[in-house]
Image (cartoon, grey):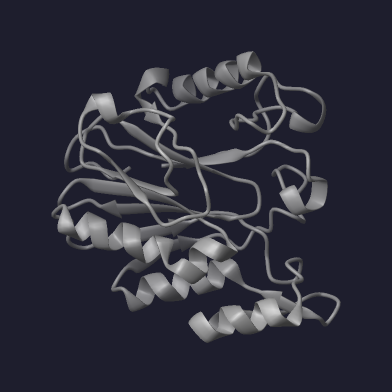
């Protein structure tokens, strides 16, 4: 698997330089070049990396054939058991998660923002992986905005804590905040998933990463999961 940062691409200005997201104001030609560069770095074909249209929902896109590799479907998670196919989701503060069940050859990726965490998108992806035959599942949680920087209104923190009490937090200013990554991690553990890696790098604080809250107009990073044979880890 791979978690990208913002460097090594062709975009400029606020999108400098490895912006992988469309519909953020960047030139689609440069986004295509960035995606091709990413695919080459991962030794994958650019047309075999599946991107989805993310809507902060809980739908899971199943890539069951190469024909399912597309950018059209609206979903915030993807799963597959096909070798040689990359699954991607894009983030710029939200929580990126890669899921792997190496004993059965299933992988998944999840985009979980505040709304996705509250609605259980990561657990939904795990459930659908298990329905597809996955057994022991491991989670790799990438960089996202930390609770020190994710200040929210009091009512929003209260709403989050009703669903996931451990997500309640305090910002660096001492105000209400939400720990979205912590909430996602807790939900995954409660669902029987083992956390293999949990990055505590904050996208808002790290200049090498895109952050929507810091910049508003900015690019998008990706988590990409894939495997080369049914028993390889991604």
User: Where is 146 relative to 33, above or below?
Assistant: below
* Number of disc labels: 0
To which quarter of the image does residue 10 belong?
A: top right
Residue placed most toward the observer, 104 or 65: 65
Question: In the image, what residue occupies the spot 20% across and 29% down?
Answer: 65
Depicted 177 relative to depicted 13: above or below:
below
**Is 232 drawn above or below residue 121 in the view shown?**
above
**Residue 97 found in image quarter:** bottom left
The reply to whether residue 184 is in sight is: no
| Residue 109 placement (x, y as % from top left) | 40, 48
Is 72 positioned to the left or the right of 64 in the image?
right
Position of the C terminus, as image quadrant, is top left
**Place of residue 93 in the rendered image (x, y in percent of width and height, measured from the top left):** 65, 53
Q: Which residue is at a point 62% across and 13% down the rendered structure image? A: 29
Residue 206 horizontal/vertical position (percent): 74, 51
Tell me if 12 is positioned left or right of 184 in this view.
right
**Residue in front for this viewpoint, 10 or 162:** 162
* Residue drawn where x is 42% and y is 46% of the image: 75
Left or right of 173 on screen, residue 210: left
* Outermost residue toward the right in this view: 173
At x 35%, y 66%, the residue is 123
The spot of residue 233 in percent (x, y) is 28, 45
Quadrant location of the N terminus in the rendered image: top left
Residue 147 visible in the current orientation: yes
Toward the viewer: 217 or 145?
217
């Amino acid at each position: 698997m791979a978690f990208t940062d913002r460097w090594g691409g062709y975009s400029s200005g606020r999108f400098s330089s490895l912006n992988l997201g469309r519909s953020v104001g960047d030139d689609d030609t440069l986004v295509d070049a960035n995606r091709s560069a990413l695919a080459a770095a991962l030794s994958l074909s650019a047309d075999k990396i599946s991107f989805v249209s993310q809507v902060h929902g809980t739908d899971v896109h199943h890539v069951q054939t190469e024909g399912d590799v597309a950018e059209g479907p609206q979903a915030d998670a993807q799963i597959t058991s096909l070798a040689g196919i990359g699954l991607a989701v894009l983030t710029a503060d939200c929580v990126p998660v890669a899921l792997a069940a190496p004993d059965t050859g299933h992988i998944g990726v999840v985009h979980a923002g505040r709304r996705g965490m509250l609605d259980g998108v990561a657990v939904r992806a795990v459930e659908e992986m298990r329905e597809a035959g996955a057994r022991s599942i491991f989670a790799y949680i990438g960089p996202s905005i930390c609770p020190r920087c994710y200040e929210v209104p009091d009512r929003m923190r209260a709403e989050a804590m009703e669903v996931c009490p451990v997500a309640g937090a305090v910002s660096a200013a001492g105000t209400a905040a939400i720990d979205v990554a912590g909430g996602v991690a807790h939900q995954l553990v409660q669902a029987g998933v083992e956390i293999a890696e949990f990055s505590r790098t904050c996208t808002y604080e790290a200049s090498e990463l895109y952050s929507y809250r810091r910049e508003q107009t900015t690019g998008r990073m990706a988590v990409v999961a894939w495997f080369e044979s049914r028993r390889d880890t991604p």
